[in-house]
Amino acid sequence: MAEATPGTLRDLGEDAVIARLCAALPGGPDLVAGPGDDCAVMRTVVPGQWRLLKTDCVVEGVHFLSGTEPERVGWKAAARAVSDFAAMGGAQPEEALITLIAPPECPMAWAEGLYAGLRRCAERFGFGVVGGETSRPPAGCAGVIVSVALSGTIAADRCRFRSGARPGDGIWTTGQLGGSFASGKHLDFMPRLAEARWLVENLGVTALMDLSDGLARDLPRMAARSGVGFRLDGAALPLSSGSDLAGALGDGEDYELLVAISGEPAAGQLAEWGRLFPGLALTRIGEFVPFGAGDGLTAGGWDPFEGGAET
């Protein structure tokens, strides 16, 4: 007898839902990494080069409020996918497809503003918008949905996954954490593409991911994928202005990099970071330890099947 499907999406939570839905899906012969990392990674016909695929969306009332300036919505929709490219080691985005679902009553000026934000992100990070789709929501649903599918490339030896952390690796983060909604950073953040490339090229980076769902949810994901535990130094967390420890752990939408680094960076390397990326902190916040040891973070962070709007 087939196993009964348990409960609802809310009962399971995002990670368990994804695991169940993707368990029996075919990956294809060229798949390097699929669900569970920030992007899908595929082999190509070019030796030493991999192709990355990512799709992401923003939903009115969930990722932005109805009064948000459309250009900021467009920037966020595209920049979320670029942030995932950063989390794979700083892959170069190349082509994007845009799907817009909007009610017929949506003002054309709003839609044009949305695409101005999409265009600004594409020009900033050097990728083209090559097509997409438009549709409308069902009657009675007035919310806008924007989906961005992004593809690009990275040298295989520069690509990093969530699964590479080892006991003894330091846990580092870029920037400050918490307060993304109150400050508006969740709409205007800058994906850490150049920063990720520098980290991979200059430091012993073993694992990477972006902090989109909050440290309390994303750090355990990295540890689980790597088969390790972790010890977090709460006093070391770089807090955004007006944020506290709970916000840094659980607010989400920081779009900073969570980095596992083998060994300690030299003083000269940290000074070079400061010269190249002025005003952007690079902070050691803990250490990975053997599986079964360390801390547990069981609450906080964003899950799309819990609660209400992110914003």
Image (cartoon, rainbow, N blue to C red):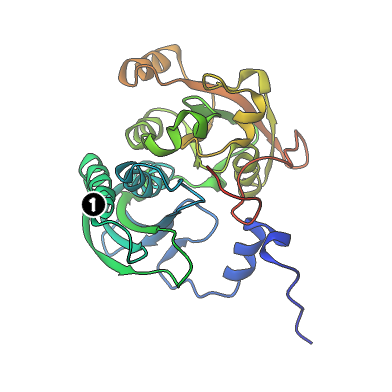
Q: Is residue 7 left or right of residue 43?
A: right
Residue at (28, 51) in percent of width and height: 110
Q: Nearer the viewer, residue 232 or 63?
A: 63
Residue at (35, 17) in percent of width and height: 278
Screen quadrant of the N terminus: bottom right
Find residue 95 and report its horizontal and vertical position in percent: 25, 57
Which image quadrant for residue 14?
bottom right
Q: Measured along the vertical axis of the image, is residue 216 above or below residue 32?
A: above
Q: Is residue 231 left or right of residue 52?
A: right
**Dot 1, how many residues are within 10 Å of its Cα: few (below 14), some (14-19), or many (20+)?**
few
The residue type indicated by label 1 comes to Ala
Which image quadrant for residue 76?
top left
Find residue 237 and report its horizontal and vertical position in percent: 60, 22
Q: Is residue 94 left or right of residue 191?
A: left
Find residue 38 and report its horizontal and vertical position in percent: 47, 51
Residue 201 visible to the viewer: yes
Which image quadrant for residue 219?
top right
Residue at (66, 18) in percent of width and height: 235
Q: Measured along the vertical axis of the image, is residue 27 above or below residue 293?
A: below
Residue 48 visible to the viewer: no
| Element type at mark 1 | helix
Give the tally of numbered discs: 1
Q: Nearer the viewer, residue 266 or 297?
A: 297
| Residue pointed to by mark 1 | 109
